[in-house]
Structure formats: C-alpha cells, structure tokens
Image (cartoon, grey):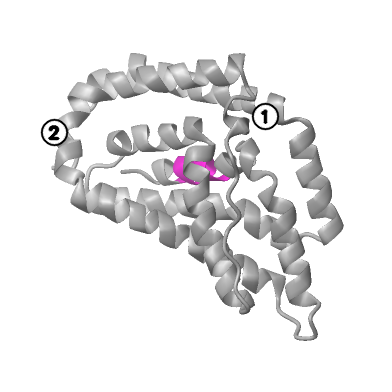
C-alpha cells in the first residue's frame, strides 16, 4: 500500500456524492437541518454537526470494510485473478451507459435519512444513512472503489484504511456544506442539479478510463492480495 492509494480513494470518495444526481435533493434538506439546528434558541456549531455527519459516513464505510476485508477477505483473495477482468469490463460498461444515457441512474428513488429530536443524533444518523444511500445512487464510482480495493491493498488492515479514507471523502462535501453559508449551499446544489447530465457524463468518462487503465496496464501484474 502507498499513501497515493489512500489519497486516490479519498478523492474518489469526494467525487462520489458530488456526481450522484439522485443525492442532490438531499443537500437542501441537509442545509435546512443545519439552519434549523442553529435557529431554535440553542446555538449549535455547524462545523460540529458537519463533523458528526462525517463520523456517521465513516462509521458506515468502516462497517462495510469489516465485512469486505475480514469476513470476505479470503474469498476475495481467491477470486481476484479470475474475476477482476470481468469486474472491470462490467465497470467499463457502466461508464458507457453513463455516457450514453446519463439520466438512467438519476431516476433512482431518493430515501430521506431519519431525523430525531436531538441534532447531534440526527447529524450522525444523516451521515450513516447517506453512506448507505450513496452506494446504489452512484454505481459507477462505487464499483470503481470496490474493484480497485483488492488491487491496491495487500492486507486486511490496509483495505480497512482504504474504506476509512473513502468514507472521509464521502463526508467531505457535506462538511463543506456545513462550513459555507446557507445561501451559498443552495446555489451550489442548484448548480449541480442544472448541470446534472454533464456531471454524469464526466463521471462515466472517468469510470471508463479507470476500467481501461486497469484492464490493460494493471491486472496483468497484480499479485495475490490478503496474503
């Protein structure tokens, strides 16, 4: 494992919610939640709530990482050499679909994260369920993450660190919304919604490029993982 692997998965995590069109409707609700939590007579730091959201996302991805790395680790190790080429060919197909029909995955339904009477609990729950919602909402980049994980990391611990890094990236845009003003946040979400088809096409191009790179340059030299 190298630091560049963790950095690349962090930035992949950052891109994932920003290019998941069906999560865009969640951003105004999140901004409204931050505003209401600050306006009910008991001032709460948006930064603290944003950090709790990130903690929720990281907790969800860490849980997925435990299952992936510790429970399924040996099965993944046995299947990497056989099924990795198939996985990256399928990943390339997803990229082509996103380029040709960018609205297909945007038509997936959006599920609102749960709320509670306690802002701190709501913020953590929002992050946890945001992590769960994002997986079917942006299959291209999520598949890129899962496909590259067994290639980039050699042990279960390294794989777990990759999941944590990806989770930090997923939560980073939400922390960014917590740091900016309410009006700026709404302008950003409208901008993403207005250019959603371009966002999906760019994502499809990234996914296709990643799949081609791994098929032609990486997989022929991939050593066994989780050894």
Q: Which residue is mark 1?
A: 199
Compared across the picture, whether 37 is left or right of 114 comes to right
Compared across the picture, whether 55 is left or right of 202 comes to left
Q: Which x, y percent locates residue 182?
A: 82, 60
Q: Which residue is mark 2?
A: 78
Rendered residue at 86%/56% (across/down): 183
Q: Which x, y percent locates residue 164?
A: 41, 55
Q: Secondary structure at mark 2?
A: helix
How far apart are the alpha carbons under marks 2 and 1? Answer: 36 Å
Above or below, 15 relative to 102: below
Above or below, 35 relative to 206: below
Rendered residue at 33%/39% (across/down): 149
* Mark closest to the chain's N terminus, 2 or 1: 2
Q: Nearer the viewer, residue 26 or 179?
A: 26
Report the number of numbered marks: 2
Residue 10 in the magenta stretch? The answer is: yes
Rendered residue at 47%/42% (across/down): 135
Q: Which x, y percent locates residue 70?
A: 21, 53
Label disc, if present, on residue 226 of the rendered structure: none
Which image quadrant: the N terminus?
Answer: top left
Compared across the picture, whether 89 is left or right of 8 comes to left
The furthest residue to the bottom: 42
Residue 136 in the magenta stretch? The answer is: no
Q: Which x, y percent locates residue 18?
A: 63, 41
Which image quadrant: the C terminus?
Answer: top left
Q: Secondary structure at mark 1?
A: helix
Helix, strand or loop: magenta stretch: helix
The stretch in magenta equals 7-14
Q: Nearer the viewer, residue 77 or 37?
A: 37
Compared across the picture, whether 115 is left or right of 62 comes to right
Q: Is residue 58 visible?
A: yes
């Amino acid at each position: 494992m190298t630091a560049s692997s963790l950095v690349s998965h962090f930035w992949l995590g950052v891109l994932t919610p920003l290019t998941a069109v069906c999560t865009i409707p969640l951003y105004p609700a999140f901004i409204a939640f931050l505003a209401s939590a600050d306006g009910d007579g008991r001032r709460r730091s948006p930064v603290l709530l944003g950090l709790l959201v990130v903690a929720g996302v990281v907790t969800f991805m860490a849980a997925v990482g435990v299952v992936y790395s510790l429970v399924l680790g040996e099965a993944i190790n046995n299947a990497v050499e056989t099924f990795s080429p198939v996985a990256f060919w399928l990943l390339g197909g997803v990229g082509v679909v996103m380029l040709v029909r960018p609205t297909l995955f945007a038509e997936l339904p959006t599920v609102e994260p749960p709320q509670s009477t306690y802002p701190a609990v709501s913020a953590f729950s929002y992050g946890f369920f945001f992590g769960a919602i994002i997986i079917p909402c942006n299959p291209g980049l999520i598949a890129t993450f899962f496909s590259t994980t067994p290639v980039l990391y050699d042990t279960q611990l390294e794989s777990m660190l990759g999941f944590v890094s990806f989770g930090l990236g997923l939560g980073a845009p939400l922390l960014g919304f917590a740091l900016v003003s309410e009006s700026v946040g709404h302008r950003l979400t409208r901008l993403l919604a207005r250019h959603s088809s371009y966002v999906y096409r760019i994502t499809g191009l990234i996914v296709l490029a990643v799949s081609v790179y791994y098929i032609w340059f990486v997989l022929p030299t991939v050593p066994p993982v989780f050894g």
